[in-house]
Amino acid sequence: MLRPFVFVGLMMCLAPGCRGGQSPGTIAFSRRTGDHWQIWTINPDGRGGRQITTSPSDKRYPAWTRDGKRLLYRDNNNRAFAFDLTTGREYRILATLGMIGSLAQSPVGDKLLVVRFDATLKDHSNLWLTSIQGRDQRMLTRDAGLQYDPAWSRNGKRIAYISGQGYQRHELYLMNADGTNKQRLTVNAALELLPAFSPDGSKIAYVSDVTGDFNVWVINADGSNPRQLTGDPGIDTRPCWSPRGRAILFVSDRSGSLQLWTMNVDGGDLRQLTHGSPSMEPAWKWSTSK
């Protein structure tokens, strides 16, 4: 049986100065901290690691709000939360939407993309639009199986996401922000996961196991020229573009445990950012300063 959230991701400030102290280009991520996963931030050079959340439950899958002042994430019960980096306040959001998989705020306006599971159906989720207050809820996809891993283009006009049923054939799709003009970008007997638009919208980084291992790939936004960027045995996953599109952040276990790495957009110049406790699910705050 495919768990509803198995692919969706493959309280108080503890550190001095972390409230409101996030620099442009800050990276948020999940880190194993004691018995649970918590949200941390780090600078793009790998320095300045700061723990943001602390709780007796997992906090996972961070996403920045458009203004960079709040972090959105969910716990291990699929409940969504926001953390205000200025005040240090954590609060629950979208309680009326039930089981939440992941969240992403539009770079234009105040809309959130939300993966919402149907608890009455096996392996079934769709993408919804809502405000962070839970108003103006609207279903964007109405398809069988799992629709998940949504990502906005920087201009807010297009959404990349994954759609699939069963273990294989989870493919990369593209649609307009209103749910129209759906296009399938990949066709193979493999898992495609975790798309991320380049800042200029011309390319989409994603994860695929088409070669046998999970690796980071990039494809043109029109579906042409898919290219493999990583090839290390094991897991390379969760790509995330730097704000100016000069590098790609990703998660790899090539050093023995899951850690954050960066590479050039051609797959070269690899550099490990985090060490120690496993770290994953990075989200790079959009900024033109890095």
Image: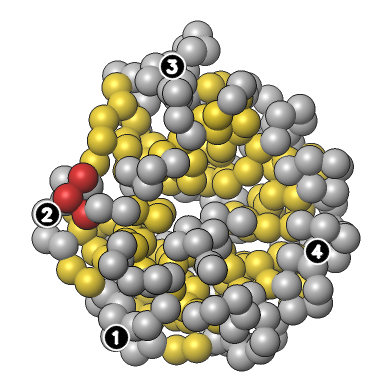
Identify residue for label 3.
13
Point out the tag, 1 or 3, that comes first from the N-terminus: 3
The amino acid marked with disc number 3 is Cys
Point out the tag, 4 or 3, that comes first from the N-terminus: 3
Identify residue for label 1.
180
Alpha-carbon distance for marks 4 and 3?
A: 35 Å
Point out the tag, 1 or 4, that comes first from the N-terminus: 1
101 on left or right of 1? left
Mark 1 residue crowding within 10 angstroms, few (<14) / some (14–19) / many (20+): few
Label 2 element class: loop
Identify residue for label 2.
135
Mark 4 residue crowding within 10 angstroms, few (<14) / some (14–19) / many (20+): many
Point out the tag, 2 or 3, that comes first from the N-terminus: 3
224 on left or right of 92? right
Alpha-carbon distance for marks 2 and 3?
A: 29 Å
**Residue in the image at 54% along x and 59% along y:** 6
Residue 149 visible from this viewpoint: yes
Point out the tag, 1 or 2, that comes first from the N-terminus: 2
**Residue in the image at 21% along x and 45% along y:** 95
Alpha-carbon distance for marks 1 and 4?
A: 33 Å
Identify residue for label 4.
230
Query: Which of the two discs, 1 and 2, sits closer to the camera?
Result: 2
The picture places residue 123, in percent across and down from the top left corner, at 43, 70
